[in-house]
Image (cartoon, helix red, strand yellow):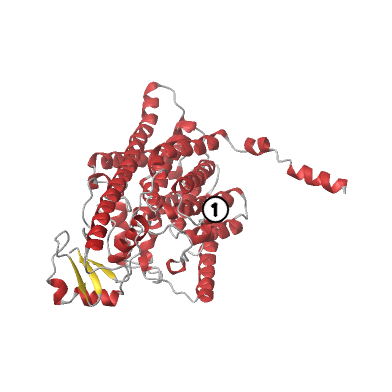
Amino acid sequence: MSTIINKIKNTEKIDFRKICSKISNVEKVAFITVMVLGLLTHIFMFVNVLPNWDSMYNFKGDKIWIHMGRWFLNESQKLSSIVDIPWVIGMLSLVFIGITCAIIVNVLEIKKMSSAIAISAIIVTFPVVTSTFSYMFLADGYMMGMMLSALAVFITKKYKRGYIVAGVMLAFAIGIYQVNLGFAVLLSLLVIMLKVFNKDEDIVDNIKYAIRFVIMALIGMVLYFIILKVFIFILHRGLGSYQGADQGFSINKQSILNILTEFKNLPKVVTGGYDASFSSLILLLFVFAGIMLLYLIKLNKIYKDILKLILVLIALVSIPFITGFAYFISEGTAYHMVMRMSWSLLFVAIITLNEKISIKKGINNLLQQIVYSLPLVITWIIIWNFILVANISYLNMHQRYEKEYSLAVRVVDRLEMSEEYNPSTPVLFAGSPYTHNTPGNYSEYIGHVTGTDGNSIFFSDYHFNQFIKYYIGLNLNSVSDKKANEIMNSEEYKSMKSFPNKECIKKIDDVVVVKFS
């Protein structure tokens, strides 16, 4: 018995110092940067409840997301409970992003602290993270998915046959959010390119190495679809039409044009708004990237190996199609900011290129120091813009909430004062006080940051009802869509005045109608 107890005691003695010693200082710095800079950037969102049109009624994350093909999303949110708790979800999200960044600096073999800090700063302040935090009830799940996709790449790189386990991990990442496939594939491409630029390895070794990542991606996709079909069969649920989830994979001219247009707009979209100066800086950074890539090809004599050169060209051409692969599922896909996390890896690639050249060539004088520092300086200016975009986004969300709350209080007050209303009577809020395309106060800065933009979160009768239920505390009886359409097409409704006119409330067919527009 004592022997068993001693064995149990020995297993409990986990040497954390030994575990930590296996984590490089660069990886630790990457993680710490995310936690510190991420908190400074996003704390306003973490300590407030700032709803958008989706999060305003999703206080419990106990939904089944099979209709969107996200069969593991609900389970991935359980760590923070099923309740939408901004501080807990926000901090968990930063932990997942921090681990992701530590993995990225590992697989890209980053050596310099300055590069690791810049990579982490780019990712944690990227407008995609800001946009995701506006859907706070989903944020920890989405960030866990990104971490799993990075971990899949790490395992495939580290272990010769790791692609099997990695493929399973990738399937779960895709099961959280399908765009994680693009993130994993693009990160894999960067890892493969590092091997290609190693002049000590021939093209055959490069191709064998690349095949590991291809197998990982294939296992991930096939397993994802198998599990999805199983869930659909068991739950008797079909895929919805949202973002073309119910459509098959299709490559055609229009989808290719959509992808190229999407990629062309990257410098404009990724700044969050419409400030041309920051878009110009991103273009300048990409010009630097092109020069650095050509220089690295010359430095490693890649031009002497035609097959390696072809591999590099194929990799470059494939980037837009990796980041925009959702257009192959549906031509009508609307690429929201939350779907563009793979774009952050392009900035990571530039920082990596800069480091590899500076280490290989060395810095021997002031001029070289300036040349190598310039891309990092530009990157930090862009990071500062991302921080500003994040906080302008949260400011807009705060002001938007205050306006919507004020409007809801006014409407409820008018409703309860009306002789037409009693608690058992169904209520229809017809039209919207604003339109979906109403520009916000800060559209020039955050026009592309989905979830934070615009003046209103009331896009339908349902949204208004839910807001009143959760933020005013009045549970109103709603009407069916069919009944609502009948009322809104009636002459009696058309003759009504719109809010705030005193004749904006009227009972039609035993339904109290509040007309907005």
Q: For mark 1, does the 10 Å Cα neighbourhood hold few (<14), some (14 to 19), or many (20 or more) residues?
A: few
Observer able to see residue 459? yes
Q: Quadrant of residue 456?
A: bottom left
Task: Identify which residue, 132 or 356, lies in the foreground.
Answer: 132
Tell me: 171 left or right of 494. Answer: right
Task: Identify which residue, 437 or 243, lies in the foreground.
Answer: 437
Decide: is 248 above or below 318: below
Q: Quadrant of residue 299?
A: top left
Decide: is 68 above or below 93: below
Q: Which residue is mark 1?
A: 79
Residue 213's spot in the image, x, y percent? 53, 55
Task: Identify which residue, 251 or 394, lies in the foreground.
Answer: 394
Numbered disc 1: secondary structure: helix
Please tell me which residue is depicted at 36% across the width and 46% down the height of the picture: 127
Which quarter of the rendered picture does the C terminus lie within? Answer: bottom left
Tell me: 337 left or right of 515. Answer: right
Please tell me which residue is depicted at 66% across the width and 38% down the height of the picture: 16
Tell me: 213 left or right of 123. Answer: right
Q: Quadrant of residue 294?
A: top left
Residue 208's spot in the image, x, y percent? 56, 54
Decide: is 71 above or below 288: below
Please tell me which residue is depicted at 31% across the width and 46% down the height of the picture: 398
Residue 453's spot in the image, x, y percent? 28, 51
Identify the amino acid type marked 1.
Leu
Observer able to see residue 110? no
